[in-house]
Image: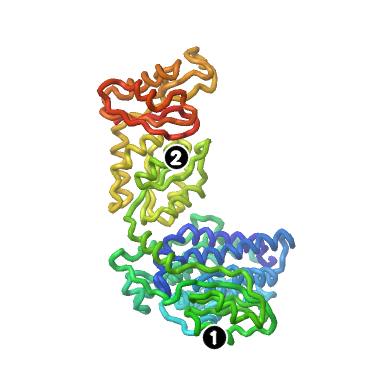
Amino acid sequence: MADPSIERFRRIVESAYLELDSRRTEVNDLNVFPVADGDTGDNMVLTLKAVLDELDGLESQEGPDVDRSEIVEAIARAALMGARGNSGVILSQIIRGAAEELASRPGELVDPVLIAASMASAADAAYESVRDPAEGTMLTVFREMASSAAKRLAHMEKARLNGEVTAETQDEILAELLDGVVKDGEQAVARTPEQLDVLKEAGVVDAGAHGLVVMIAGLVAGLRGSADAAPEVARQAPPSVGRSHHEDSRFRYCTNFIVTGRGLEARSFVSTLETIGDSVLVVGDESTLKVHVHCDEPEQAMEVFSAVGEVSQLDVADMREQVAARAARLASGRSAVVAVAAGDGVRDLYENLGAMVVDGGPTFNPSIADLLAGIREVPAEEVILLPNNPNVVMAAQRAAELSDKTTVVVQCLAPQAGLAAIVEVDHDKGAEENADKVSTALAGMSIGSVARAAKDDTKGRFFTGDAVGFAGDEIVAWGGAGSTLAKTMEVLSAEAEILTVISGEGAPLGVDEAAEHAPEGLEVEIHEGGQPAWWWLLVAE
């Protein structure tokens, strides 16, 4: 068979990217070395994203039948250009080392022997990129994974493959090898606190090392053609607030840029950069260098190269802000609420109760990606997810499955009910316990709504433009806006003490007028919600 096509390369790389991206917050929160700036996951994900973008561009220009050497050379350069931060630059060198080995053997099929050789070259390239490599980091763990691949060859029936093997068989054989490498990588990650005191003091494993294992697990899933086929990699808990350790750089800015020129020698610039900063990494070739340094004056770092080349793609991050943001995230409580909602007023109501809101839009149909983004952004280890609409439940469940955080979907099918129920949440408790509390609260509520009829009723009860009132899914009132609202309130509040009404976009009665239609003796709260489609949303407790 021919070398793997660019489509196969892309499928496998994309799988690794998605697996790592789904757990980037987990990796970020582990990040205490060399600086506790909480961006290791971000940096590794961005490096892989640059590789994906390069593969897309290459395929669009060259078509599906691109030579393997051209593919691996392109992705090595893309990783270099897209790398950011210590972890991103080191990952780019792992990719470069593997790519160079693959490119040096154009006549060989990609098989376990070639994979093991590529991993060994990648480990060497990564170590060479760091002037004073620390053990107990991603460098150590990748070296041990490369060693695992070499040792496992002896126990494989098909360590070498010939041209008669099918693509499916080739992929499964490579997946078998890397599946074992992931298991050995997990054990190596677990040993990192024994090798690096900073990790031991913080009570965490190395962030970049854990990210690498997650990434390789994603490669296995890509080889097997299913996200569900990834080897399980145990979740790693962040440091508790009391144990969080900040290994702070004495410098403020994480500075990254590209230098292009002629006859560039990476190591010749390191000592000069170390006089103005720390965490110095300079990698690349004679024509292109990637520079990473922590310093107080990014302009000084760029000035080092002013006489030898052109500086571009400057990226500067304020590490003090990153450290503060990470600390706030880890101190924010164990669990939080993510709720789907529509309307500025409804959003404000949820946010005032401490929830993260995912915008449902006019159709109340957020994507799985929207839900994952909300889960990732909320500053807590665990999440209670409220879909707030029957049409969102399946997407919410899928987002919970894909998330790197413990996420529990509560069967809350209306935003007004969620608002009343989340007052029961104790953010210091876990998601499961809080989900039970919210579910119990929901069971004691009655929900309703009033909307404008979009068409004539087939039974002749109402016509287009009339008000229609619902108790749950049952129509209980219709006709004029005021009388329909009053009847719906009456039905819902038969055994209730409190009635909450949320006024929507285009409601024909103002807030004060709506309140006048409530039954006597009932405590009524009315809010401006601004939600589309529904004139009023109601919940009785």
Q: Mark 1 or 2 closer to N-term?
A: 1
| In this view, 37 is above or below 150 | above
Query: Residue 49 at x, y = what percent?
Result: 58, 62
Extreme residue toward the top, this view: 460
**Front residue (pair 91, 132):** 132
* Residue type, label 2: Ala
What numbered label is drawn on residue 272? 1
Q: Quadrant of the N terminus?
A: bottom right
Is the residue 4 above or below the residue 225 in the image? below
Q: How is the image coloured?
A: rainbow
Left or right of 45 in this view: 436: left
Does residue 48 sit above or below 507 in this rendering?
below
> Can I make out residue 294 in this image?
no
Q: How many marks?
A: 2
| CA distance separating discs 1 and 2 | 54 Å
Residues under numbered marks 1 and 2 in contact, where contact means CB atoms less than 8 Å apart = no
Query: Residue 327, image x and y in percent?
Result: 36, 63
Q: Amino acid at mark 1?
A: Thr
Residue 186 at x, y percent in the picture = 41, 69
* Residue sitting nearer the eye, 536 or 406: 536
Q: Quadrant of residue 67?
A: bottom right
Q: Residue at x 49, y 28 (%)?
A: 506
Q: Is residue 264 left or right of residue 228?
A: right
Residue neighbourhood size for the residue with mark 1, other residues' Cα within 10 Å, grouped as few (<14), some (14–19), many (≥20): few
Tag nearer the camera, 1 or 2: 1
Please identify the quadrant where the C terminus is shown. Answer: top left
Residue 174 appears left or right of 103 = left
> In the image as oriented, which residue stretches furthest toward the right?
62
Mark 2, Cα crowd under 10 Å, few <14 / some 14-19 / many 20+, is: many
Q: Which residue is mark 2?
A: 341
Image disc number at residue 354: none
The kind of secondary structure element at disc 1 is: helix
